[in-house]
Amino acid sequence: MPRNTDSPTQATPPSGYTIPPPFTADEFWEKILLLMREHDGYITKERFEDVFGVQLKQTKSYEDGSAMYSLKKGTDWYFDAGLWMTGEKFKKPGGKMGGVSSSLRIDWDFDTFGEVNVGPCIRTDTARKDILSSGWRQGIQERHRGAADEFYKNESTNQVSKITIFHSGDFASSCVKRITVNGRP
């Protein structure tokens, strides 16, 4: 069952998690920032669970120590989420060693935190500013319906980390609707 300590008057039905969640867009974004800042984008299952107060469900495990975890919107959490943890023996296609890494993806709808273009959301301009102020470098920016921005860290090493935010376009009230965070310890 979901933890619902922030809003004692809001009850979550036994069938799952309902929208809006019992936390604001800003509170959700702060948790994402905490995770991506701690280890330059490397996020463990245990840390994700600790920060968000939810248990990831293992969907696959591999002989090399890699594993996939997920959460389904409405059943397991307020959002769709997936975390892929690769092990020390993980090999990339072609047989090249890949090593330990994590890849987190969280998806939410534009109206998750309130009415579209009226209610609160994770603003794209705020997300950009926060990521850049955390020491990440702006990479590719795609400007069209379904726009995305990429940010990088540790590019001079073999431990490159990457964040991608997907948003509703390049305008003042643009809202983030998905984030991916890829990192290495």
Image: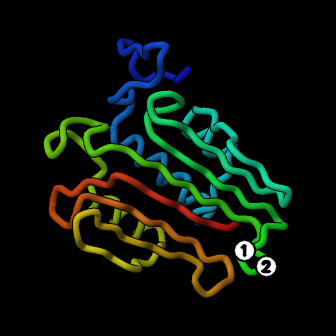
* Disc 2 secondary structure class: loop
Task: Write the residue at 44% across / 78% down.
Answer: 137
- The quadrant the C terminus occupies is bottom right
Q: Is residue 133 placed above or below 73 in the rendered structure?
A: below
* Amino acid type, callout 1: Lys
Left or right for 50, reference 121: right
Q: Residue at x 52, y 70 (%)?
A: 162
Which residue is under mark 1? 92
Kindly indicate whether the residue at mark 1 contacts the one at mark 2 (C-beta within 8 angstroms).
yes
Q: 159 or 12, which lies in front? A: 12
Query: Which residue is drawn at the image coordinates 23% and 35% (left, top)?
Result: 114
Q: Quadrant of residue 18?
A: top left
Mark 2 surroundings: few (<14), some (14-19) or many (≥20) residues within 10 A: few
Looking at this view, is 10 or 109 the one in front?
109
Q: Position of residue 128 (x, y in %)?
A: 34, 66
Q: Quadrant of residue 76?
A: top right
Q: Amino acid at mark 2?
A: Gly
Task: List the single residue furthest toward the bottom.
Answer: 156
**Dot 1: element:** loop
Q: Nearer the viewer, residue 25 or 62?
A: 62
Question: What's the distance in space between the residues labelled 2 and 1, CA to CA?
Answer: 6 Å
Residue 53, given in percent of the width and then of the height, sits at 57, 32
Q: Is residue 162 above or below residue 58?
A: below
Tell me, for residue 56, which label it has, or none.
Answer: none
Dot 2 corresponds to which residue?
Answer: 95
Q: Residue at x 70, y 41 (%)?
A: 58
Percent from the top left, x then y, of residue 159? 66, 76
